[in-house]
Image: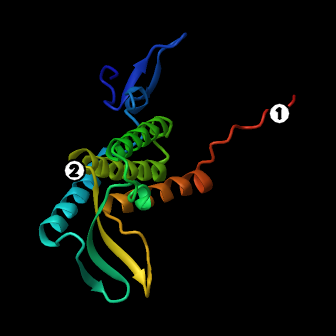
Amino acid sequence: MLPGGDESQVAVATAGAPEVVPVAAVRPRFFGVLWWVSLLTIALDQATKLLVDATLPVYSSRTIIPNFIDLVHVHNAGVAFGLLNGADHPQRSLLTTGLALVALVGIAYYARHVRSEERIARLGLSLILGGAVGNLIDRMRQGYVIDFVDVYSGDWHFWAFNVADAAISVGATLVFIDVIFFNRHASHPVSDR
């Protein structure tokens, strides 16, 4: 902070005279995520799974909107969209947990490169992180994830999903929107002088 000055500014020593910069510019960034969004996503995900587990027997369902949405109670021991769910491999739980941890490392790596002004991408990453951690908690605790939203039309059913899955999908969409429409991360062309 500058003596007698604004608390939102500090003096940073440079090669010449000290330069005055906002405090936020010198505080270390710990990833480009909104932690409160991630924590809220994890809490909502875990609470809804506990509620489904306590009130709806496994493999049963309740109609919410006829011919459109049911609450179901299924266990997904695979990965996204039920992949590997039918695999009968003794190390399936270890494999799916490992894949989730690799995904979290990738999220953390990408988050370190998101600038603070990239608000849509930061929100998206926060949702992805919260969803990934929510499902990882289930995999580590019980070896499967509880899915409970069944969207369907006639005989066609989308894969059953949960709050964490929805957060990951919405988050990924927000990151893509930010990258494609707002913050293209392409290098600037070098011009000949």
Mark with earlier residue (1, 2):
2
Q: Position of residue 111 (x, y in %)?
A: 45, 39
Quadrant of the snapshot with the C terminus: top right
Residue 15 vertical position relative to residue 71 in the rendered view, above or below: above
Q: What residue appears at the point 69 percent right and 37 percent down from the top-left corner?
A: 187
Residue 13 vertical position relative to residue 83 in the rendered view, above or below: above
Residue topped by disc 2: 142
Q: Position of residue 49 (x, y in %)?
A: 21, 62
- In front of the other: 74 or 91: 91
- In front of the other: 88 or 47: 88
As helix, strand or loop, the secondary structure at mark 2 comes to helix
Residue topped by disc 1: 191
As helix, strand or loop, the secondary structure at mark 1 comes to loop
Q: What residue appears at the point 46 percent right and 39 percent down from the top-left corner?
A: 106
Alpha carbon distance from label 1 to label 2: 57 Å
Q: Position of residue 163 (x, y in %)?
A: 31, 62
Q: Which of the 4 image quarters holds residue 82?
A: bottom left
Residue type indicated by callout 1: Ser
Q: Which of the 4 image quarters holds residue 55?
A: bottom left
Q: Position of residue 73 (x, y in %)?
A: 25, 69
